[in-house]
Amino acid sequence: MIRVAVTGAAGRMGRLIVKNVIEDRELELVQAFDVREIGKDAGEIAGCGKIGIAIEDSSELENKLKADVLVDFTNADAAVRNICIASKKGVKLVVGTTGFTDEHWNKIKECCNVPAVISPNFSVGVNIFWELIKKAAELLKGYDVELLEMHHRFKKDAPSGTALKAVEIIKEVVGEKEVVTGRCGLCQRKDEIGVFAIRGGDVVGEHTVLFIGMGERVEITHRAWSRQAFAGGAIKAVKWISKIDEPKIYGMREVLGL
């Protein structure tokens, strides 16, 4: 049985992760942390009924964390803190938080000394999407590249972590290019990649990369209509990382054997 703790357990993704852990026979939810709903039953918050695990204050993580794997879907500042605490305690990590700055990443690399899966997107489909755009970028060199991403109105970071990862993959193939996140006025296209974010309603997540040539274009799109796509991937990552001993940062590429 893999003993799992969840930070951000009262959030949209956190509740779904809790539900998935409860329903999986290989996993045991042993702790749940958040800055909200403290003292309430994590199972009830997740819609699963009482399980006898109360949500604990995230500020107590350093004193109370006791698990095999910590799953973190919080915010960038909180996630860095949680990663450092888990590393100090020898707890393996699965982190789906996005919005990390270079400063955040430097701190993560400095303190993360346990096996950890850190990915901007745990969806199996998105990870295949990344493989497809890499191949397309290799075959369509010289085509203009634009990226459009759409998320719900409550998402805080833009462009999305998934979009930034897509840009990183494309640049590895075509070379360094300027990334433009908005155009207005006189702005004739240069040797650049355009990345545009739409926010509204309850859109779970949609990403389209366009390779545009003279007289034609190729579009590769991934659409998620349920957060279960991300939660299911995170559960795969928990099971995979529980068997890994080498302390380093992995991605879903390794989890899925790509």
Image (cartoon, rainbow, N blue to C red):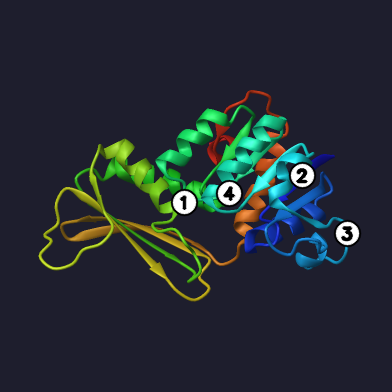
Mark 1 secondary-structure assignment: loop
Q: Rounded to the nearest whole Å, what is the CA distance between mark 1 and mark 4?
A: 11 Å
**Which residue of the protein is positioned furthest toward the top in this rendering?**
246
**Amino acid, disc 2:** Val
Residue at x 76%, y 61% (from the top left corner)? 38
Q: Rounded to the nearest whole Å, what is the CA distance between mark 3 and mark 4?
A: 26 Å
Mark 3 secondary-structure assignment: loop
Q: Residues within 10 Å of mark 2 (few under 14, many from 20)?
A: many
Q: Residues within 10 Å of mark 4 (few under 14, many from 20)?
A: some
**Amino acid, disc 4:** Ala
Residue at mark 1:
99
Q: Which mark is residue 51?
A: 3
Number of the front mark, 4 or 2: 4
Residue at x 58%, y 27% (from the top left corner)? 248
Residue 136's x, y, as percent? 33, 46
Q: Which mark is residue 78?
A: 4
Q: Give the number of callouts.
A: 4
Q: Which mark is residue 4?
A: 2
Number of the front mark, 3 or 4: 4
Q: Are marks 3 and 2 in contact (CB under 8 Å)?
A: no
Q: Rounded to the nearest whole Å, what is the CA distance between mark 3 and mark 2?
A: 14 Å
Mark 1 or mark 3, which is nearer the start of the sequence? 3
Depth check, front residue: 100 or 206? 100
Q: Rounded to the nearest whole Å, what is the CA distance between mark 3 and mark 1?
A: 32 Å
Please indicate whether residue 231 sits to the left or right of residue 60 in the image.
left
Depth check, front residue: 47 or 124? 47
